[in-house]
Amino acid sequence: MNDLPKELLDELGGQLKDDRKYTIHDHVLAKINAHPDGVTVNDLMVYLFFANDNKLTKREYLYHVLSRLRKKGLIHTKNSGDAHGRAMNLITEEGAKLARPTVETPGDGA
């Protein structure tokens, strides 16, 4: 968004300034918000790997984060309905208001 012409940036409220460090909660909300059809835990694991300088996030910790976000009403989970029966994590309206932009990561389609 900061690459927009100055006139348009001024109209939209000026240049975005958010120097706050991304937490794992920010990363997870951003990734889920970027995909309206939802994301699987595996999608999140790959995104977090690249977003955290190639550091692996433990799956159990990710489940804990997802559980906390669900309890706060920021995401919900539903079955994908495909043959594999994958659980899809989807953003709620409240979660979308709090989600920050996804961090561009190499090799990630976000």
Image: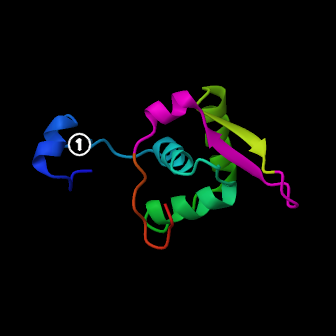
Left or right of residue 6, residue 1 in this image: right
- At x 49%, y 73%, the residue is 107
Q: Which residues are magenta?
A: 81-100
**Image height of 12 relative to 53, above or below:** above
Q: Is residue 88 magenta?
A: yes
Q: Residue furthest left?
A: 6
- At x 14%, y 38%, the residue is 10
Residue 46 placement (x, y as % from top left) = 58, 64
User: Please, what secondary structure does the residue beneath circle 1 have?
Assistant: loop
Left or right of residue 54, residue 40 in this image: right
**Image height of 70 relative to 65, above or below:** above
Report the label total: 1
Q: Depth check: 79 or 64 in front?
A: 79
Q: Is residue 71 magenta?
A: no
Residue 8 placement (x, y as % from top left) = 17, 44
Q: Depth check: 22 or 97 in front?
A: 97
Q: Amino acid at mark 1?
A: Leu
Q: Residues within 10 Å of mark 1 (few under 14, many from 20)?
A: few
Residue 75 placement (x, y as % from top left) = 62, 35
Q: Depth check: 30 or 60 in front?
A: 30
Q: Residue furthest right?
A: 83
Write down the residue under mark 1: 16
Residue 67 placement (x, y as % from top left) = 68, 36
